[in-house]
């Protein structure tokens, strides 16, 4: 079964298409209310956040962490300071897809292997 991920944020680098071609089942949340609703209604193997200037990462993480322990993958686009301890994988702006896909797969596998990991 394909890993289910939810994406929130601006898909400036066509990451959704990359994830789909890699075999992930991807749902896109267009606003914070959609993200909350999706997280309540389905289980996800990972939460993918694409940072932009307008995104309050800490506020989005609060929403995500109240709903799930699934790994959070953050694609950075700014240099603003942030609290990285609640994020499982931070991907800087110009990392190649083959590299972040491999790291993402490892984060999902680690989560699945934890006791009660597939929340």
Image (cartoon, helix red, strand yellow):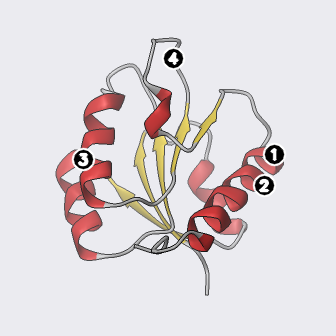
First-in-chain label (3 vs 2): 3
Label 4, on which residue? 78
Quarter of the N terminus within the rendering: bottom right
Label 1, on which residue? 99
Asked whether the beta carbons under mark 3 and mark 1 sit within 8 Å of each other, the answer is: no
Q: Residue furthest front?
A: 115
Residue 70: % across, % down: 45, 60
Q: CA distance from mark 1 to mark 4?
A: 20 Å
Label 3, on which residue? 63
Examine the image and state in which quarter residue 37 appears.
Answer: bottom left
Q: Horizontal placement of 89 versus 54: left or right? A: right
Asked whether the beta carbons under mark 1 and mark 2 sit within 8 Å of each other, the answer is: yes
Q: CA distance from mark 3 to mark 2?
A: 26 Å
Mark 3: few/some/many CA within 10 Å (<14, 14-19, 20+)? some
Q: Horizontal placement of 60 versus 95: left or right? A: left
Q: CA distance from mark 3 to mark 1?
A: 28 Å
Q: 81 or 79: nearer the eye? A: 81
Residue 19: % across, % down: 64, 60
Q: Nearer the viewer, mark 3 or mark 4?
A: 3
Q: Residue at x 49, y 29 (%)?
A: 84
Residue 79: % across, % down: 53, 12
Quarter of the C terminus within the rendering: bottom left
Q: Residue at x 76, y 33 (%)?
A: 95
Mark 1: few/some/many CA within 10 Å (<14, 14-19, 20+)? few
Q: Is residue 30 visible?
A: no
Q: Residue at x 56, y 69 (%)?
A: 114
Q: CA distance from mark 1 to mark 2?
A: 5 Å
Identify the mark at residue 102; answer none if there is no mark: 2
100 vs 113: above or below: above
């Amino acid at each position: 079964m394909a890993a289910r991920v939810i994406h929130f944020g601006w898909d400036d680098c066509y990451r959704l298409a990359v994830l789909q071609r890699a075999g992930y089942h991807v749902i896109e949340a267009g606003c914070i209310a959609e993200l909350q609703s999706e997280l309540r209604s389905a289980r996800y193997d990972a939460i993918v956040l694409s940072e932009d200037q307008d995104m309050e990462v800490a506020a989005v993480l609060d929403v995500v962490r109240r709903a799930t322990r699934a790994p959070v993958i953050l694609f950075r686009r700014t240099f603003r300071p942030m609290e990285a301890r609640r994020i499982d994988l931070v991907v800087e702006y110009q990392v190649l897809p083959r590299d972040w896909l491999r790291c993402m797969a490892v984060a999902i596998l680690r989560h699945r292997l934890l006791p009660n990991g597939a929340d």
